[in-house]
Image (tube, rainbow, N blue to C red):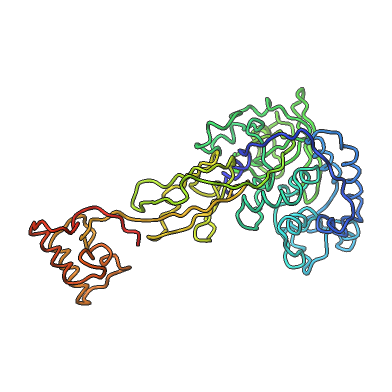
């Protein structure tokens, strides 16, 4: 699991919507993509419809909680061990080419079907998502409650991940939803997970789990073994009793179902099959949220559409754009390189910094960097070069008889000119390496003052 995903996902600034419209689900042709036929005939679909109708005038967090509670009791047949025919009749799964009954393959739920079919545009008959679905369940609840229409959701999804894929870890539940850092609270257990480059953007760090302002519908992240090593589960807050320190939450993929549970933060116990520990140490982060303004694509520009980079230099490159996004990914020559949450790339307020290690594999010459943001994309031409001394055939930063001999051996086919490096760096008298270049190097060694630039520094672009 890449810990930066949770950091990056929660860093994106959002603009608060003044108005927010909820669409109550209906069995339209389009809904066939959102909901399976089995689900639409199930009591969970009816409960979802009622929950959205009854919470239409509620806050975004309250609507999300209402959606989650409407799914109470939904079971994943693979882990719940229920009869397949009965499960299908109850709307608990959809028909696919292969029915997977292995309890370790937990992806066959209505919620993972939504992610696969509706978000990823994949044929549900050809593939199932095998994943721990707590993360996707939260995304599904947020979506049903009104967060993003389909096109905006897909734009978020594809731009952030740069390729159609689903992450299976709990920190990727965010998928298409991003929240203001002012509303994110990190406990001491999460301290070592926070990216040092983002310290000026964090607002609530090392917050005591007992002092977090839990609200119904807020999102809470757990580390079940209390080590803080992973953000390995996400749930939706139902209630928090400050007097008893009992936190009530609802979640998916808890014993293979959607269920509401309680945890006493002030108790040390064995919990969810994990070792004895203080339950408050299991809390990693908490998030409030509000409505999201639709993101409209815009033309992303940069003052440096073409830049040069010294492959032997001590640092990478920085590119400033007019994007307001802090989500980004990079592809080079059409090959996906990763996002800021996966590698040594930092992006804040449109400034992208790519570390040297991310570029070290590039050969000399011109490469196209495609920088993808949540509000657009921009290509940048990266011209990779190495500084060299003209006439230095062996690359030791000296001009001596060895260089003249090296060129002679190449001309006599006694040595190979790998990648044409010697030809590019020692062809000073004409377009092609020849005996006159040997003579020019020899004259430089003898301190003749010729017009050739032998000994001067130049750039080799390949």
Q: Quadrant of residue 174?
A: top right
Measured as percent of width and height from the top left, residue 343 is found at: 51, 49
Q: Quadrant of residue 285?
A: top right
Q: What residue occupies the far front of the structure in this picture?
A: 451
- Tell me: 130 left or right of 410: right
- Tell me: 207 left or right of 457: right
* Residue found at x 77% / y 49%: 255
Measured as percent of width and height from the top left, residue 269 is found at: 69, 36
In the figure, 223 relative to 361: above or below?
above
In the figure, 227 relative to 165: above or below?
above
Measured as percent of width and height from the top left, residue 75 is found at: 83, 52
- Tell me: 222 left or right of 28: left
* Residue found at x 27% / y 70%: 417
- Number of marks in picture: 0
* Residue found at x 76% / y 39%: 236
User: Quick one: 79 or 367, which is closer to the camera?
Assistant: 367
Q: Quadrant of residue 185?
A: top right
Position of the C terminus by quadrant: bottom left
Measured as percent of width and height from the top left, residue 29 is found at: 86, 59
Q: What residue occupies the far bottom of the structure in this picture?
A: 413
In the figure, 399 relative to 286: above or below?
below
């Amino acid at each position: 699991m890449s810990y930066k995903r949770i950091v990056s996902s929660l860093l994106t600034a959002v603009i608060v919507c003044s108005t927010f419209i909820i669409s109550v689900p209906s069995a339209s042709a389009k809904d066939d993509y959102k909901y399976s036929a089995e689900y639409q005939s199930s009591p969970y679909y009816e409960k979802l419809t009622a929950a959205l109708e009854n919470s239409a005038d509620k806050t975004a967090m309250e609507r999300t909680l209402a959606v989650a509670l409407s799914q109470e009791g939904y079971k994943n047949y693979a882990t719940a061990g229920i009869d397949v025919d009965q499960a299908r009749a109850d709307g608990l799964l959809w028909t696919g080419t292969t029915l997977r009954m292995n309890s370790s393959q937990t992806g066959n739920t209505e919620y993972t079907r939504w992610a696969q079919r509706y978000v990823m545009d994949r044929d549900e008959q050809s593939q199932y998502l095998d994943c721990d679905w707590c993360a996707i369940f939260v995304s599904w609840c947020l979506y049903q409650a009104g967060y993003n229409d389909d096109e905006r959701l897909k734009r978020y999804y594809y731009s952030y991940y740069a390729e159609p894929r689903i992450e299976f870890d709990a920190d990727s539940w965010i998928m298409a939803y991003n929240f203001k850092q002012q509303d994110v609270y990190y406990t001491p257990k999460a301290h070592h997970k926070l990216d040092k480059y983002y310290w000026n953007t964090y607002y609530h760090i090392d917050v005591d789990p007992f002092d977090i302002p839990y609200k119904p519908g807020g999102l809470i992240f757990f580390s079940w073994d209390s080590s803080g090593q992973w953000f390995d589960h996400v749930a939706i807050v139902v209630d928090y009793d400050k007097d008893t320190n009992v936190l009530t939450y609802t979640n998916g993929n808890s014993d293979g179902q959607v269920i509401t549970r309680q945890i006493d933060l002030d108790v040390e116990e064995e919990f969810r099959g994990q070792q004895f520990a203080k339950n408050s140490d299991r809390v990693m982060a908490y998030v409030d949220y509000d409505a999201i303004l639709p993101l409209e694509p815009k033309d992303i520009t940069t003052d440096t559409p073409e830049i040069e980079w010294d492959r032997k230099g001590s640092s990478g490159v920085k590119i400033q754009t007019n994007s307001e996004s802090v989500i980004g990914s990079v592809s080079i020559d059409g090959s996906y390189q990763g996002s800021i949450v996966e590698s040594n790339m930092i992006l804040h307020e449109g400034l992208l910094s790519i570390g040297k290690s991310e570029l070290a594999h590039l050969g000399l010459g011109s490469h196209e960097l495609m920088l993808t943001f949540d509000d657009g994309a921009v290509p940048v031409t990266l011209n990779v070069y190495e500084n060299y001394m003209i006439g230095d055939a062996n690359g030791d930063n000296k001009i001596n008889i060895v260089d003249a001999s090296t060129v002679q051996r190449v001309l006599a086919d006694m040595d190979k000119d790998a990648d044409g490096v010697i030809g590019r760096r020692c062809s000073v008298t004409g377009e092609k390496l020849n005996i006159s270049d040997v003579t020019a190097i020899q004259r430089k060694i003898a301190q003749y003052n010729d017009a050739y630039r032998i000994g001067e520094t130049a750039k080799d672009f390949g």
